[in-house]
Amino acid sequence: MASGGFELAFGLALGFSLAVPPGPMNAFIAAQSVRSRRRGTLTGLGAMSADAVLAAVVFLLSSALDLSAYARGLYLVGAVVMAYFGVHLLRTRAETGAAGPSDARTYTTALGIGLSNPFQILWWLTAGLAFAYLGGAVLLVGLFGAIAVWVVAFPIVVRAGAERSPRFAPVVTLVSAGAMIAFAGYFVVLALG
């Protein structure tokens, strides 16, 4: 395989390693996707924008980054944000087509969650930092290409489930809220540990 092909494949693998694993952001994307595919995709785009911001920080400051002294605070902030949005999901109606925030608010909420998500931040400070040292535009294209595929495909799949069964949306919302609250608790444990 040519060097460019390897770099693209490696970038895709890194992108999927960031986007696919279950976590608070995918829980939020799923909860928004049961309402509409558009809201799910906008949520994913907000998360992807957070990745772009974090990538820029890592690339610009890769030689000077050492945030280990701030890890506990990072986990606590993440815990508060995840708990807030988990409880908020429980309070909102999960009916498909239910009224909800505007497109801009859906996007900015996801952006805020992404920028305060310790898992997302730590991914960029570990795998993303290694990625910064490897460099290469082809790697970057692969990474964000994989994220783009996920933020479009995942809401389509979740929305299809919501359209097939009226019980699907409330279950996804409950599981998503529970996941966010569980991650908040986990972040507190990490902060205190």
Image (cartoon, rainbow, N blue to C red):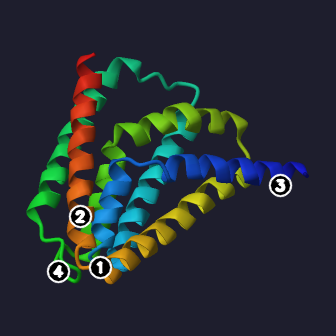
The answer to which quarter of the image holds residue 70 is top left
Circles 2, 3 touching at the beta carbon (< 8 Å): no
- Kindly identify which residue carries mark 2: 171
Question: Which of the two labelled residues, at mark 1 and mark 2, occupies the earlier sequence position?
Answer: 1
What residue lies at 54% left-to-right and 65% top-to-bottom?
A: 148
Mark found first going from the N terminus, 4 or 1: 4
**Disc 3: which residue:** 5
Amino acid type indicated by mark 2: Val
The three-letter code of the residue at mark 1 reads: Ser
The CA span between labels 4 and 1 is 16 Å
Q: Quadrant of the C terminus?
A: top left
Graded by Cα atoms within 10 Å as few (under 14), some (14 to 19) or many (20 or more), the crowding at tag 2 reads some
**Dot 4, crowdedness within 10 Å: few (<14), some or many (≥20)?**
few
First-in-chain label (3 vs 1):
3
Instruction: Point out the residue furthest to the left here.
Output: 91
Residue 170: horizontal and vertical position, in percent?
20, 68
Q: Earlier in the sequence, mark 4 or mark 2?
A: 4
Please name the residue that numbered disc 1 is placed on.
165
Say which residue label 4 marks: 98
For numbered disc 3, what is the local secondary structure? helix
Structural distance between the alpha carbons of marks 2 and 3? 41 Å
Location of residue 172 in the rendering, given as x and y in whole percent from the top left corner:
27, 63
